[in-house]
Amino acid sequence: MHFSFSLYDSLLISLGVLLLVCALGVPALSFLNAAAGTLRKKLFMVKLAGQLSRLGLMFILALTLISAGILAAAVFLEPGPGLLAEHQEFWKTAVYISGTALLLYGLYFLTWNKLARWPVLHLIPAAAAVAACKIFLGLLFWSVWRELDPMSPVHPAPDSIFWPILAQLFLLGMAAGAVLGMFYLLYRRNLDDFGRDYYRYTLGLLAKWGIFFAVLSPLTCVWVYFVSRETFDPAYLILPGAGFALFLLFLILTLLRIARSQQPMRHKPAVFLCLVLIWLVFALRLVSYLEMADMVTEEEVVRTFMRDWADYLGLTNI
């Protein structure tokens, strides 16, 4: 399998990956804020968790409907041999897992007021739903990785490069969930009028969550190096890696500006900028992941546009 990967492909597919991991990031942030708010007795954190739970439920519902739609297409539109039919069992499993996550998270969302006096009982289905989303995304990304590296075993080995890549995707998904949550708060400002103090606090809090997970995400690059040091070749990782670091730094600085502001609601353009920056971060990480897949297989499975740029600049001779 050999195919090219253009800049347009990178932007389009990374947007889909970003939205996919937000199906984990947003529900997980709702759970974390609900748990932390309950332990610290912070009413605003609990209210924020309630707002994010609505957004998280929409993401998980979309995940379930997409899985069910693909499975239905595989069963009814492609009964014979084909790409969808070949992965029919996978999508059956995906429907079961995403459906379970939807039921559990729906229970968490619908019992928000009824189980307010029993916070532990209320948080259990949310934690289970987040775990189900992690399993779903892990299986989905592993199936894609096996398409890039057909020689991969059925299950990823403990020293597989796939694990640090998955960990970084989850961390970036949490950062993306925080950024999307900020945008959602701006959208709901006039519909959920909880007062100026609430939005001042929660926008800053989400910015801090975004900074926390964004700062953690590059640490997985060290993990990548140690598990692939025998085949590690930085030639085609320099450009996407540098771009990733640059846009991630801009994202962190923009979030820091929002977090430190006394009036974060006045920084609406900065919130929109964060959405663009996290999208570019995902686009460049996606290119790096494809280059890592080539590095592991020791052949050019995918030729990304960054290879042409690196060849033109002579970076491969460094």
Image (cartoon, helix red, strand yellow):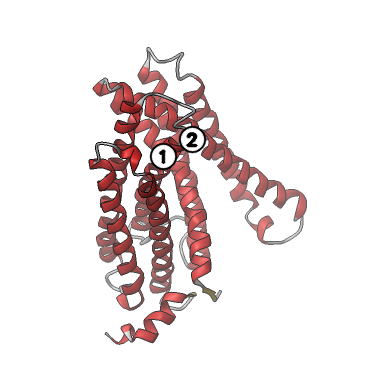
Disc 1 element: helix
Q: Residue at x 45, y 55 (%)?
A: 155
Q: Residue at x 36, y 24 (%)?
A: 195
Residue 231 makes an appearance in the image = no
Give the image quarter of residue 318: bottom left
First in sequence: mark 1 vs mark 2: 2
Cβ–Cβ under 8 Å for marks 1 and 2? yes
Residue 1 locus on image (x, y percent): 56, 74
Q: Amino acid at mark 1?
A: Gly
Residue 31 visible in image: yes
Q: Position of residue 141 (x, y in %)?
A: 48, 55
Disc 2 element:
helix
Count the numbered circles shown: 2
Q: Is residue 316 above or below residue 76?
A: below
Percent across and percent down for residue 6 are 51, 72
Q: Which residue is mark 1?
A: 181
The foreground one among 228 and 56 is: 56
Residue sitting farthest toward the front = 266
Depicted 194 relative to depicted 116: above or below: below
Marks 1 and 2, how far apart at CA: 8 Å
Residue 156 versus residue 102: which sits nearer the camera?
102
Q: What residue is pinned by disc 2? A: 55
For the residue carrying disc 1, how many other residues have a C-alpha within 10 Å: few (<14), some (14-19), or many (20+)? many
The amino acid marked with disc number 2 is: Leu
The structure residue drawn at horizontal position 26% and vertical position 22%, both measured from the top left corner, is 39
Asked where in the image residue 230 lies, by quadrant, the reply is bottom left
> Which is nearer the eye, 194 or 9?
194
